[in-house]
């Protein structure tokens, strides 16, 4: 068994354990292996281990890594988990299966229009800036409903919410906050939790955890 496969098994086991402890069905939680800045041999080891769900935070980098591999793995699922500029929307819609980082009306409109053009419907999450950090991507919580209204008008398929808690704060509060925001709006999907805190995210209701270094090792 490769080191990567061992890591994946270990993370999946931890997810199971946290789910059991907090009365959740492990089948409701999916592991997004975050492959950004990882070398080819680690990606191929994860694919050989049978893992098919990956997250990337840059469109160009993701195209370089996945466009050719996609041909060999038709069941591959790719999530965009990094900020998206409107000039990259065309490539993002063509490549990704889920876009997790919708955070402003202009982007929502550009995505909806590009999906119509390509005849391709890509489910999206809204990224919420739960810590209200100036420099961070994500819609401010007070602006969430206005953004949801725009998405609905545009016909964008919003299935849930995503967050990245502030680095210097306990993440659990942010996870619970995101869960409440989603629940109050009837949204089912919650993408939260990274290598350092994914068990806490499972406890708080995550349906996707985004785990990079605990699966692949340190990024290059
Ligand atoms: C890089 C990244 C991750 C994974 O981080 P790790 O700490 O390596 O698990 C998760 N989510 C987002 C949005 C990221 O950019």
Image (spheres, rainbow, N blue to C red):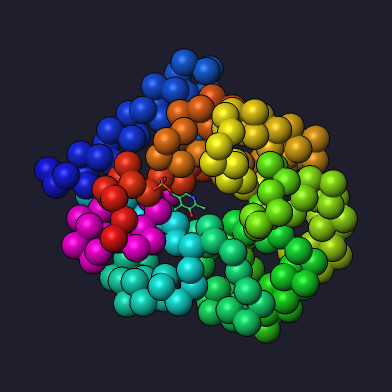
**Count of marks placed on residues:** 0
- The x and y percentages for residue 53 are 40, 53
Horizontal side, residue 91 vs residue 211: left or right: right
Q: Nearer the viewer, residue 198 or 187?
A: 198
Report whether residue 10 is seen. yes
Horizontal side, residue 193 vs residue 70: left or right: right
- The x and y percentages for residue 78 are 45, 61
At 72% across and 70% down in the image, what residue appears?
107
At 32% across and 77% down in the image, what residue appears?
68
Q: Nearer the viewer, residue 75 or 9?
A: 9
Report whether residue 77 is seen. no
At 58% across and 33% down in the image, what residue appears?
169
Magenta range: 31-47
- The x and y percentages for residue 132 are 73, 46
Residue 178 drawn in magenta: no
- The x and y percentages for residue 202 are 51, 30
Horizontal side, residue 25 vs residue 108: left or right: left
Q: Quadrant of the N terminus?
A: top left
Which quadrant holds residue 43?
Answer: bottom left
At 64% across and 55% down in the image, what residue appears?
136
Which quadrant holds residue 150?
Answer: bottom right
In the displayed structure, would residue 142 be above or below residue 52? above
Q: Quadrant of the C terminus?
A: bottom left
């Amino acid at each position: 068994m490769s080191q990567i496969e061992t890591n994946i098994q270990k993370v999946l086991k931890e997810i199971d354990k946290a789910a059991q402890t907090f009365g959740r069905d492990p089948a409701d939680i999916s592991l997004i292996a975050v492959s950004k800045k990882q070398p080819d041999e680690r990606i191929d080891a994860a694919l050989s281990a049978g893992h098919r769900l990956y997250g990337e935070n840059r469109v160009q980098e993701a195209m370089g890594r996945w466009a050719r591999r996609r041909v060999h793995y038709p069941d591959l699922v790719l999530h965009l988990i990094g900020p998206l500029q409107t000039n990259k929307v065309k490539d993002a819609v063509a490549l990704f299966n889920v876009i997790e980082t919708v955070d402003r009306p202009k982007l929502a409109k550009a995505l909806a229009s590009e999906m119509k053009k390509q005849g391709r419907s890509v489910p999206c999450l809204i990224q919420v800036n739960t810590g209200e950090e100036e420099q961070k991507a994500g819609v401010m919580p007070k602006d969430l409903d206005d953004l949801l209204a725009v998405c609905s008008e545009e016909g964008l398929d919003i299935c849930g919410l995503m967050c990245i808690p502030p680095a210097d704060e306990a993440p659990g509060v942010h996870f619970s906050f995101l869960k409440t925001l989603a629940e109050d709006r009837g949204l089912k999907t919650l993408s939260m939790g990274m290598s350092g805190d994914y068990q806490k995210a499972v406890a708080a209701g995550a349906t996707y955890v985004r785990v990079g270094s605990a699966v692949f090792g340190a990024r290059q």
